[in-house]
Image (cartoon, grey):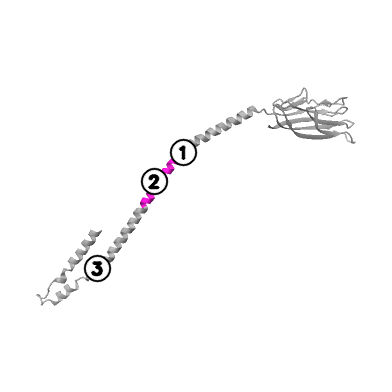
Amino acid sequence: MELMFLLLVAFIFSSGQCLDTDFSTDPSSDFEHAELTDCQPDSCTVCREMSAMRERLAAMACTQDGLMKSVRSLRTAMAANQKELGVSSAQIPPLQGLTQELAQQLTALQESTSAAVPRQAFTAVLGHSLGPLPIHRAVKYPLIITNIGNGYNPATGSFTARVSGMYYFSYTMYSGSPTTNSVVGLMKNGQMIVTTWDTAGGDINDSATNAAVLQLEAGDFVYIQLYANRNIYDDNGRYNTFSGLMLYPL
């Protein structure tokens, strides 16, 4: 840039050599002398213009340097981002593999847990009338609707817990004899938990239901007891039922 500036100054001043020409030797041409005089450049104006041009060139050079620095900074930032992106991309396949492995382990754990803890649930129906009898008696519900885990035994009418846990039981009693006289209870290991009664009233078609949530240990048994000298009525309508299920193990 400095070289161009010096060449431009030399060209302008070389063009102005007509300032030193002596026209007095040719007095017959005043017009030509005036015309040559008019072509002489103004040295002060030329210097000012050159100085202004030099300042503009310097400003342009400064701006160019700033732009180059910005470009270099952007390139550095882009390279860093590309490097970081490359690292992140490289981490994706291992993470996907780890997630899949954990999902498989969870599935296997769920399957093993389900296999280790037996599921128990049942519903049984009486289907025939029973009583009155001279003693308390466990009601044997022979018609099995559901018996998952085989916890209910129709030969005894009892449900036996295979594992310790929380269990839910419910039963329905129906009194339909000419004389209302029904008392039934939910029993745990021979101990009464809840009962239903229907021993008075002019109607002969009464139904009652009761339920309980029990904490059982493995081997505990639950059954429905018909009290002595009481009776319950049933037929193909299946009014008397006994149901139970394990809520969760303990």
- As measured in the structure, the alpha-carbon distance from the residue carrying label 3 to the one carrying label 2 is 48 Å
The amino acid beneath tag 3 is Cys
- As measured in the structure, the alpha-carbon distance from the residue carrying label 1 to the one carrying label 2 is 19 Å
Q: Quadrant of the N terminus?
A: bottom left
Query: What percent of the width, then of the height, locates residue 72?
Result: 36, 51
Res 83 quadrant in image: top left
Horizontal relation, residue 111 to residue 166: left or right: left
The amino acid beneath tag 2 is Ala
Residue at horizontal 38 percent and vertical 51 percent from the top: 73
- Checking the image for residue 47, the label placed there is 3
Magenta region includes residue 237: no
Q: Give the residue furthest to the top.
A: 155
Segment colored magenta: 71-91
Horizontal relation, residue 165 to residue 75: left or right: right
**N-term-proximal mark, 1 vs 2:** 2
**N-term-proximal mark, 3 vs 2:** 3
Question: SS for tag 3?
Answer: helix
Vertically, is 56 above or below 96? below
In the rendered structure, are the residues bearing label 3 and label 2 in contact, judged by CB atoms less than 8 Å apart?
A: no
- Checking the image for residue 91, the label placed there is 1
Query: What percent of the width, then of the height, locates residue 250?
Result: 68, 32
Q: Is there any visible trace of residue 45 in the rendered image? A: yes
Question: SS for tag 2?
Answer: helix
- As measured in the structure, the alpha-carbon distance from the residue carrying label 3 to the one carrying label 1 is 66 Å
Magenta region includes residue 85: yes
- Checking the image for residue 158, the label placed there is none
**Label 3 environment density (alpha carbons within 10 Å; few <14, some 14–19, many ≥20):** few
Vertically, is 58 above or below 128? below
**Label 1 environment density (alpha carbons within 10 Å; few <14, some 14–19, many ≥20):** few
Residue receiving disc 2: 79
